Amino acid sequence: MIELRKDREERRLTTMLYICMVVVMLVLLYATYQNFRRYARTVQEVAVHNMALLELEGMLSSLRDAETGVRGYLLTNDTAFLAPYRLANRRMYDHTARLGLHGLNAADSLRLEELRQLSATLERMWRSMVFNSGRVEAAVLAHDLGGSRAVMDEIRVVHDRLGMDRTRRRDVLLTQQRTEGVDAPFMLVIYSLLAILATAILFWRLTRTLRRNEAVRLALRSKVRDLDVEVSQRASLQAQLQQVLDVSPSGIMSFRSIRDAGGHIVDFEWLSSNRMANASIGRDDLVGKRLLEEMPENRTIGLFDDYVRTVEEDIHSVKEFHYSGSGLDSWFRHHAVKLEDGFMVTLSDITEQKRAEQINQESDRLELTAQITRTVAHEVRNPLTNIHLALEQIQDETLDRQDAVQPYFAIIDRNLKRIGTLIKEMLESSRKRELDTAPCRMDDLVSKTLRSVNDRLSLKGMISAVSISPGLPEVMVDPELMDLAITNIAVNAVEAMEPEKGHLAFTVSRDPSAVVMEITDNGRGIPPENIPRLFEPFYSGRPGGLGLGLTAARSILYSHGVQLDVRSTVGEGTTFTLRFPERIFVPGT
């Protein structure tokens, strides 16, 4: 700041100095110009006076020449003297006429007029004497010559006065001319010296400024080189750090706080995001953008408040959460720590882990249910066998009353068979499956299921639709069991729809970690509180159902490692989602 202030003062001083020099030089230039004008005017006036004096001398000389010619003629009667007389007369008139053109003042004009009148009088006298030279007496001519001489004397007197006045005025102007002739070069010398001085000062200051700027440029260039080296080093370190972050198995992101005028955190801005974080979120364009603008669900599920506490109170935040929205439906585990006025978070996608836990929990639950079911079935089958034997014995002993008791025997036998069938289905739904896997295409699984439910669809006037993305990998599954599981789900969907209005849709696509099959109906839907009970044994939403179909379907799917999810809206329909994980993909397909 001090250097900047010095530079500003230097520029201000240089500008003021330049302006003052220009003003002084302009004043001197104007004074020199005016001096030259006065000098030129004085020279012109001196020239005018000199010309006037020359004309006066010329007029007087012409009068003398004319007088000489007249006298010569009168004394010799030789006409040769008349030619100079006439020529001198004409010159005298010319000089008199030109004399009036050379700057006469009022006194000069009066004397010039007097000269003209005396000259005219003298000329008339000469003309009279020339004309009467042979007719009058010599005494008369002598008298006339005396008179002309007197007039000539008067002319000389007037001429001398006029010439002396002009000479005096010319001498004054000559003195002024000599003074101004010295002043003009002196002014030019001063002007030149000032110009040289001003140029020298400005050149000195400019040279000093240029030297200073050169030093600054050299220092700046050195600083720029140092900064370039530092930037290159930082870029290299950042690239290395980014490579390290990109190979990290966890997603890593950093944010800076965005605060309002009161200093409260209102949002966070992405500063960095590694490859795994981009893959987990499904976006790679978030750096420089705001968290709540791009993923507003962070506020509704409480993550934003956790991040604010992390920044404001320097509290580590470790949390597992389910994120649904912004194109995501996954489970994550994160660890957020404060980083200057922001935070850094490590993020792990634990969706598959959660699904595996659910499958394992379901497997454990099914194993426990199977044990209980086998125990119950064993305990029930023995009494049923005894009941069958007792019933046969009673039938043999009541042959004579068979018509009366046969309806009761039929009721007992039908219910015994129903109990046996129920026990068999319970054992079938809860037993551990031995899988006979083989490569299967998704369109084959869907086609086989449609063939199994086509009769039901046709009888009820329903329609079906299939959408399968091309290029899907094959999966290693047990074809018979997988067909049974998918068919049970499809039959459940058909039973949930109204005749003549039903629409059953199969959609199969690929996401980054699985092949996803969706079975959608437009039936009555399932209330949210009933969805967790769908796969419980003996729970059924329709009359006459045993409630074991979906239980068996989930058992089969989980034994393959296939995740089964349900979402439903009452009055609109239900969607069953089957996720076939990468680990059961057939390699190379």
Image: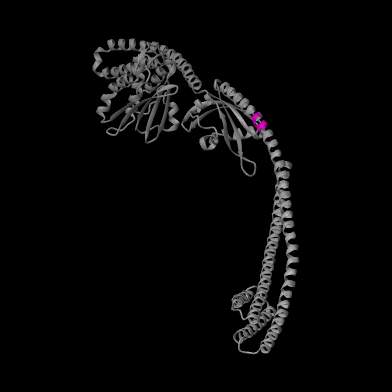
Q: Residue at x 66, y 29 (%)?
A: 226
412 vs 179, left or right, is left
Colour scheme employed for the rendering of this structure: one colour
Quadrant housing residue 454: top left
Residue 430's place in the image compared with 78, above or below, is above
Residue 220 in percent (x, y) is at 67, 34
Magenta part of the chain: 221-225
Look at the image and tell me in which quarter the C terminus lies: top left
- Which of the 4 image quarters holds residue 410? top left
Question: Magenta region's main secondary structure?
Answer: helix
Q: Is residue 250 left or right of residue 203?
A: left
In the image, 298: left or right of 218? left
Where the N terminus falls, by quadrant? top right
| Vertical arrangement, residue 518 with respect to residue 87, above or below | above
- Relative to 29, say whether 555 is above or below: above
How many badges with numbers are in the image? 0
Q: Is residue 260 visible?
A: yes
Along the viewing direction, whichever of 174 and 298 lies nearer the viewer: 174
Q: Nearer the viewer, residue 285 or 412?
A: 285
Depth check: give the residue in front, 46 or 470: 46
The correct choice, above or below, for 587 with respect to 95 in the image is above
Residue 204, horizontal then vertical, whole percent: 73, 44
As for residue 297 lying within the magenta part, the answer is no
How far across and how far down the image is residue 33, in percent?
68, 60
Task: Name the residue rendered at 68%, 37% in the picture.
Answer: 214
Give the image location of residue 146, x and y in percent: 70, 85
398 displayed left or right of 568: left
Q: Is residue 7 visible?
A: no
Residue at x 52%, y 23% (from the top left corner):
350
